[in-house]
């Protein structure tokens, strides 16, 4: 039975509820925030709603074993997650430098969770209670459920289920799985013998213990020693992540076998409504007030999660590996009910910050076939162009946001989570686009073209740059029509697999032409569980097993990033060097099409000072030739891609 109080975090809270022992204790790397944007809140409230007594140990001091004993021994077991983010991503930038702030910790303080938090917490729980049952889940465990490349140690690590010593791993969103697991534990089953729940992984000593058909992929030993085998193993994992047509997958780890049951079916609309209608407090626990609260709540407190899953399947995104390609959404009634509750919050100022999900404008499966035979195995819904079976229709989503903005006390409803502009362009009806521009943009609309070079977009599984240009033209046309000053802010990514200095220059020229200078550029971050990370590690595209160029040196990555901010004086030297390496000194000069000016007065003599002419004079500049050779030697950038591929294989 649910209770609208925070769940117990100490013995005193248990006593107030009249509880002598908890059924489950959930240990998490985040501060305790009772809001449905946080996995800890959802799983604990779902279990509570199913009649189980649940307590929370948030961000325990992992050096003190008493921290794991403060709620006593649970009757059924411990549940462990690292928080809403992988703990390594939470701690480190793409350059492997420690971040300055943790948005999921009180006051933004760093150091309140360990690296590889799931593993560390499980080890401490075993130290505190040797034979207690442990189930791991959340993003960190979910995306590391197979042997995986770990960017921070630059090696292949074992499945997190193996490394943590836990009994069972629940992957994906897990509301169904966790109740099934809880019910079996309550009947007296041991967690390590729960082997019939979809969306879980378990370990066996012998393949005869697996009572279903399965696909065996290359072992941990094979994938850690052979990049071709790694790519092949990932391709199977990638192909089989479908709850309808997916198969059981097995991967050997030494003398044991990791078994992944096929994914759990997505929640129905009624089930999803039930999850989001639970009595969340919608804020962080009051114990954090003295430390300045938790920053992570600010972006979501006045936002509404309307959907899950994504059939966009961007190569660098792990959503399809975690939530799946079949989109699920809440009912209009459930969303409106939450919007009305938000208006009652004391610090609500009339603005709903977002109504969305991983992709805001997805409200249903891409086509009818996804719920009948599953998502297509070797075909994407939007890449390289929208599938002919795609049902591009915004009418239901539009009706939802229209009704939300009509609620008394709501002044404006913004859409800030990801919008797929190619899906908008695929809709034959422009009503949604017009309404979006007129009512739901907060001055700037953020979309993610990521790049403009066709070769890079191919590896990203993103639409061609032409689609983005057409979207921009239509956006500004509608903006002008409704008499507003609004702008598009594109998210761009540098150094993705397949991206060369040449393609980075191509993107820089595009930014020059549209007169846009991004304040921030995201360097590709090889996080666990993505297609792009597999390319980064292996130098192979697992879809084709063909070689792909991967920028890895700090020097080249710095130049690619700098090219996207070529107007920044601090980036001048890097841009200058990149242009010389690629023999694009035609972009150094005074004419409008040039990216930067010559380095000094001496070099200026080799360029026309006529601003209508950006070309070099006919005489060759010997100094530039020397600079080119020196730059290539210093940066280690290899222009010959075949030579680079051979070097990586060795």
Image: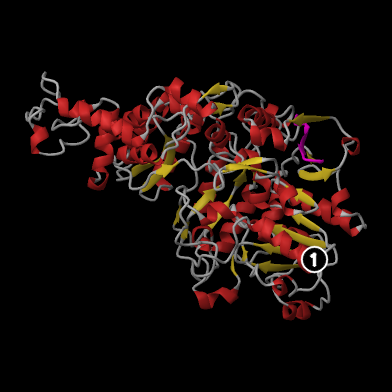
Q: Is residue 286 left or right of residue 16?
A: left
Q: At x 79% / y 42%, what residue is drawn?
A: 198
What is the secondary structure assignment of the residue under circle 1? loop
Say whether residue 253 is magenta. yes
Task: Give above or below for 50 relative to 139.
Answer: below
Q: Is residue 170 left or right of residue 38?
A: right
Q: How is the image coloured?
A: secondary structure
* Closer to the camera in the image, 183 or 611: 611
- Residue 241: tell me if it is visible: no
Mark 1, residue position? 1
Horizontal and vertical percent position of residue 408: 50, 60
Q: At x 73% / y 61%, what residue is drawn?
A: 123
Check the picture and name the quadrant holding the C terminus. Answer: top right
Check the picture and name the quadrant holding the N terminus. Answer: bottom right
Horizontal and vertical percent position of residue 294: 52, 67
Horizontal and vertical percent position of residue 183: 86, 55
* Closer to the camera in the image, 610 or 12: 610
Q: Which residues are magenta?
A: 245-256
* Closer to the camera in the image, 117 or 415: 117
Q: Residues within 10 Å of mark 1 (few under 14, many from 20)?
A: few
- Residue 448: tell me if it is visible: yes
Q: Is residue 49 left or right of residue 365?
A: right
Task: Give above or below for 79 relative to 457.
Answer: below
Q: At x 58% / y 34%, what residue is drawn?
A: 534
Task: Give above or below for 315 relative to 399.
Answer: above
Say whether residue 360 is magenta. no
Residue placed farthest to the right in the image?
Answer: 188
The quadrant where residue 619 appears: top left
Horizontal and vertical percent position of residue 109: 50, 67
């Amino acid at each position: 039975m649910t209770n609208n109080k925070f769940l117990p975090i100490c013995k005193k809270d248990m006593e107030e509820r009249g509880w002598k022992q908890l059924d489950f204790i959930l240990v998490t790397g985040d501060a305790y925030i009772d809001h449905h944007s946080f996995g800890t809140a959802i799983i604990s409230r779902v279990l509570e709603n199913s009649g189980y007594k649940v307590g929370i140990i948030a961000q325990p001091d992992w050096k003190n074993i008493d921290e794991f004993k403060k709620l006593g021994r649970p009757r059924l077991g411990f549940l462990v997650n690292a928080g809403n983010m992988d703990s390594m991503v939470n701690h480190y930038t793409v350059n492997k430098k420690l971040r300055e702030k943790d948005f999921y910790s009180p006051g933004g303080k760093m150091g309140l969770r360990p690296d590889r938090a799931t593993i560390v917490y499980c080890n401490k729980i075993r130290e505190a209670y040797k034979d207690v049952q442990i189930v791991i889940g959340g993003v960190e465990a979910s995306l590391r459920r197979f042997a995986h490349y770990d960017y921070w140690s630059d090696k292949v690590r074992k499945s997190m289920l193996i490394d943590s010593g836990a009994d069972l791993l629940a992957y994906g969103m897990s509301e169904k799985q966790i109740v099934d697991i809880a019910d079996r534990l309550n009947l007296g089953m041991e967690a390590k013998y729960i082997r019939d729940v979809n969306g879980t992984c378990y370990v066996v000593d012998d393949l005869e213990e697996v009572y279903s058909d399965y696909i065996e992929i290359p072992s941990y030993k094979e994938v850690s020693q052979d990049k071709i085998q790694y790519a092949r193993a990932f391709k199977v994992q990638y192909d089989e992540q479908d709850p309808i047509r997916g198969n059981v997958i097995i991967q050997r780890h030494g003398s044991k076998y990791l078994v992944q049951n096929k994914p759990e079916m997505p929640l129905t609309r009624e089930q999803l409504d039930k999850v989001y209608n639970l009595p969340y407090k919608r804020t962080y626990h009051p114990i954090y007030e003295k430390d300045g609260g938790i920053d992570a709540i600010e972006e979501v407190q006045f936002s509404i999660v309307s959907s899950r899953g994504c059939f966009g399947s961007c190569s660098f995104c792990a959503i399809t590996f975690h939530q799946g390609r079949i989109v699920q959404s809440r009912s209009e009634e459930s969303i409106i009910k939450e919007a009305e509750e938000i208006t009652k919050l004391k610090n609500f100022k009339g603005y709903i910050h977002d109504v969305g999900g991983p992709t805001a404008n997805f409200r249903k499966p891409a086509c009818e076939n996804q719920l009948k035979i599953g998502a297509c195995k070797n075909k994407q819904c939007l890449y390289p162009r929208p599938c002919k079976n795609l049902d591009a229709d915004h009418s239901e989503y539009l009706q939802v946001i229209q009704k939300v903005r009509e609620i008394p006390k709501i002044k404006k409803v913004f859409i800030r989570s990801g919008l797929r502009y190619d899906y908008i362009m695929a809709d034959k009806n422009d009503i949604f686009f017009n309404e979006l521009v007129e009512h739901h943009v907060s001055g700037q609309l953020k979309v993610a073209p990521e790049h403009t070079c066709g070769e890079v977009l191919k590896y990203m599984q993103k639409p061609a740059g032409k689609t983005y240009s057409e979207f921009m033209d239509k956006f500004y046309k509608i903006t002008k029509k409704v008499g507003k000053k609004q702008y598009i802010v594109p998210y761009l990514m540098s150094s993705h697999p397949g991206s060369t200095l040449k393609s980075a220059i191509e993107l820089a020229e595009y930014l020059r032409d549209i007169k846009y200078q991004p304040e921030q550029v995201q360097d590709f971050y090889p996080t666990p569980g993505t297609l792009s990370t597999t390319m980064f590690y292996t130098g192979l595209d697992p879809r084709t097993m063909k070689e792909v160029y991967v920028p890895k040196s700090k020097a080249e990555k710095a130049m690619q990033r700098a090219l996207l901010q070529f107007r920044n004086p601090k980036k001048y030297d890097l841009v200058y060097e990149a242009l010389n390496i690629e023999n694009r000194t035609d972009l150094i000069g005074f004419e409008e099409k040039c990216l930067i000016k010559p380095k000094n007065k001496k070099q200026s003599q080799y360029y026309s000072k006529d601003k209508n002419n950006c070309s070099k004079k006919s005489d060759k500049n010997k100094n530039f030739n020397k600079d080119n050779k020196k730059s290539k030697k210093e940066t280690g950038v290899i222009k010959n891609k075949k030579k680079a591929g051979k070097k990586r294989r060795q």
